[in-house]
Amino acid sequence: MTDTLTSRLKGITANIKPLNAEAQAETAAYLDSLTKPPGSLGKLESLAIQLAGITGEMKPSFTKTSVVVMAGDHGVCDEGISAFPAEVTPQMVMNFLNGGAAVNVLARQAGADVHCVDIGVASEVTHERLLSRNIGRGTANMAKGPAMTKEAALESIVAGAEVAAELVSRGTQMFVTGEMGIGNTTPSAAIFSVLSGYQPSDVVGRGTGVTDERLLHKIRVVEQAIQVNRPHADDPLDVLAKVGGYEIGGLAGLILGAASHGCPVIIDGFISSAAALVAKSICPDALPYMIASHVSHEQAHVLLLKELGLQPMLQMDMRLGEGTGGVLCLHLVEAACRIVNEMATFESAGISGGAV
């Protein structure tokens, strides 16, 4: 089983190609011909060039975007690290499926579809729109031992990549990462700490809004999990298995799967960025396909984005997750595409001074 999963993951990463440098150069030159000073639209121009490199088209456009909300539970909640009980995870999954969560509202505004995946929810959830890919009924308590087996970690990544492939077959051209899992800022902080070398005290944040006392406890739990499990920083699968979560692995796989199909993937907040760090550690070639939507209010997110080498498009003091920041970024993606598709050039507008 493990050999088969490893072979499938290798096949996925082998399909991730470098960005199209010719399309990027053409788009950069075209942007400089538009009726504005060169570079004056800042990150919108950089985004347009990146999207051109991903798609191979000088004037890219996207008609179908999928927000994928990966859901999973965490045994480390037994340590009292969250302000909310674990039962909220399946309750929120139903909320996503019924269209009532914040990400649903913002996705409707942006014209994006929301897909919820049960990849590790502790209780059974049934709904006609649920993508059921459950690998385990929640992880084990990482403060006592490994969160999951290495095979399960690998399975979560492959499952996420396969969700990406399925949605691409249905017409999806761009992805937004989303997640739901009470307690999941704790494994995300542990992953970040191990893969970056930062101390837990530098990367553990308040998550759902814990008190100062519980924050100190949360730091100690992450320290204990790392000490008990001793994950190997040079082996992202080992790190994911020992101190990670099913939905984090699923998102890492979604990112790799999106990149393997030549699709941009918009990264949401802290948990999604931890998954992005796992994906980058597995296959650095996937990084150019990632777009950082925002820097969240979670204290270490800015450090995590720096570790990834990504520049966030927005700073909104958000810390909800679900894909909410990623969906807001879709409006900027559309703006970047409209600039190259609709804006006049100096020549077409009959304006002199093209080298402003």
Image (cartoon, rainbow, N blue to C red):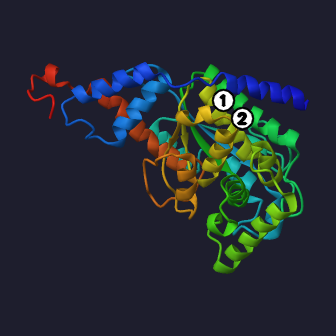
Please state which amino acid type lies under the numbered disc 2: Gly
Residue 243 image-quadrant placement:
bottom right
How far across and down, in percent of the image, does residue 151 sit?
Answer: 87, 39
Tell me: 71 left or right of 342.
right
Name the residue located 73 percent from the left edge and 46 percent from the top edge: 247
Q: Give the class, few, some or many, for how many residues have Cα within 10 Å of label 1's Cα (few <14, many ≥20).
A: many
Q: Is residue 62 visible?
A: no
Residue identified by numbered label 1: 257
Sooner in the amino-acid sequence: mark 1 or mark 2: 2
> Where 32 sits versus 100, above or below?
above
In front here: 331 or 282? 282
Name the residue located 65 percent from the left edge and 65 percent from the top edge: 204
Q: Are marks 1 and 2 in contact (CB under 8 Å)?
A: yes
Residue 13 image-quadrant placement:
top right
Please, what secondary structure does the residue beneath circle 2 have? Answer: helix
How far across and down, in percent of the image, does residue 295 sit?
Answer: 49, 55
Q: Which mark is residue 6?
A: none
Residue identified by numbered label 2: 160
Please state which amino acid type lies under the numbered disc 1: Gly
Q: Give the class, few, some or many, for how many residues have Cα within 10 Å of label 2's Cα (few <14, many ≥20).
A: many
Residue 146 image-quadrant placement:
bottom right
Q: Is residue 190 visible?
A: yes
* Residue at the far right in the pictured view: 1
Tell me: 279 left or right of 314.
right
Please, what secondary structure does the residue beneath circle 1 have? Answer: helix
Q: The N terminus lies in which quarter of the figure?
A: top right
How far across and down, in percent of the image, does residue 34 sit?
Answer: 22, 28
